[in-house]
Amino acid sequence: MLKNKRLILMIWLLSAAVGAGAQGSGILEKYIRLGLDSNLALRQKSIDIRKARIDLQRAQSLFYPQVSLNSQYTAANGGRSIDLPIGDLLNPVYKSLNQMTGSTQFPQVQNQRIQFLPNDYNDSKLEVTLPLFNPSIGYNRKIKEELINSYRAEETIYKRDLVLNIRQAYFRYLQALRAAEIYRNAAATLGENLRFCEKLVANHAATREIVFRARAQVSQVQSSLLESGQQQKNAAAYLNFLLNRPLDTPLEEDTLLLSGQVPRYALSLEQTGRGEELDKINSYQKVLQTSLLMNQTYRRPVLSAFYDVGFQGYGYRFDQSHFYQLAGVQLSWNIFKAGDNRMKLTQSRLDLESAREQYQDVQNQLKLQATTLYNTYLAQLQSMESTADEVESSREAFRIIDKKYREGQVLQLEWMDARTQMTNAEIQYSLQQLNVLNKLAELERATASFGF
């Protein structure tokens, strides 16, 4: 409990977390805002939200009347037919009537054959349908509304990942710059030592092996300088990629960011276990809960009304004799599906239970992640402070040995060893600074503390 109370999870992060240097220049903050405005993958997330809004509008349109115009004209020949013996039935009667009346008033008629497929037949209508009672439409709209929240949470998750990636890419760029500066200083020192050794040999005060050792040291540092330059280019290219800019776009250098002390920060478990990851799972739970309610609507009927107005008959004509109107109410009710609806409900309940368990699991993972990152941050901060002392000690030791070396009181190997220790300590310190800043950025990500 004591440990939990001391972990106060308010990480100010780079606008505050890396000290006054970050606040002074605002270069990194500018790059972050540029990335949030121009990153291509983030734009795709915005498109997903727009599509979800359109889906919501489509779901809302189901509450309104639906109007459709349908027109069909058919021409047919052959197929099934039915024979109607009208002549056989009526002709004897008509013949008797003519005889009785002494006239031809009742003509003879032919038997008829009626085709089932209508020929020269027109059916054109305007159809209006309106849902009167359909609960699934309302639940569908709620699902679409909640999916928008889910997409928004997913967009914010990517934004936080993007901020983390931009920070870390810029830190690697600055660290590569710092390493190149250290190696350039070392190369200058070694170049001066090479000239000093050549003078000693020229004056017959030393043998030529000291020149070869000095040249080997210069080559070694030059190789490290080239490697740090390559790392700088790679880090700059990746950052420009995140910013959706040409990969060779020059970057501004924040000279203050790695120059100051990185302060200590306290963390609070009260803000761990929060974030858009949980918001997304929470939205997913609401979708599942609404889907469960929608699946339960099978117990209720669906009632809708329709109205048709149009023209129907033989011949493609639109006159009063072909005009018709038709209105009605339709009732649909699933009474028996062999238990399929109940099994679907059981699946929905299991999905909802799984989502609740997932929520708790992710919440615990976020707490563990923040706590672990914070502990690692404290350890690396202490390591960086120890390395800072090592840098000061190695510089002072090299200054003393260099003075003695110029006076011929120490050997070249001892001078080289002191110089190597000083350079390695400076490089290690810059790496420790990078590690601490990276952990601060990861803590900002884990605690979702960056404000958009």
Image (cartoon, rainbow, N blue to C red):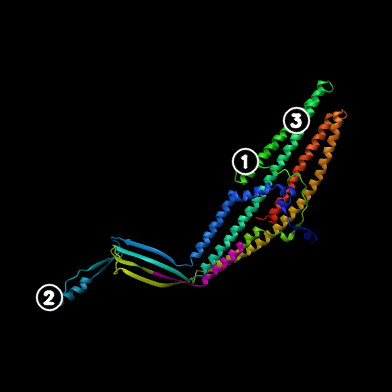
Start-end of magenta stretch: 283-307
> Foreground residue, 182 or 126?
182
Residue 144, quarter of picture: bottom right
N-terminal of the pair, mark 2 or mark 3, is 2
Q: Is residue 352 left or right of residue 257?
A: left
Q: Distance between the residues labelled 2 and 3?
A: 136 Å
N-terminal of the pair, mark 2 or mark 1, is 2
Q: Is residue 36 left or right of residue 136?
A: right
At which x and y percent is residue 250? Answer: 64, 40
Asked whether residue 117 is in view, the answer is no
Front label number (2 vs 3): 3
Q: Quadrant of the N terminus?
A: bottom right
Q: Which residue lies furthest to the bottom in this view?
A: 100
Front label number (1 vs 3): 1
> Foreground residue, 77 or 71?
71
Residue 336 among those drawn in magenta = no
SS at badge 1: loop
Q: How far apart are marks 2 and 1 (CA)?
A: 109 Å
Q: Mark 1 points at which residue?
A: 249
SS at badge 2: loop
Q: In which quarter of the image is the C terminus?
A: bottom right
Q: Mark 2 points at which residue?
A: 103
> Foreground residue, 310 or 184?
184
Residue 300 among those drawn in magenta = yes
Give the residue displayed 86% in from the left and 34% down from the top.
400
Three-letter amino acid code at the position of disc 3: Val
Give the residue displayed 15% in from the left and 77% down from the top.
97
Q: Which mark is residue 218?
A: 3
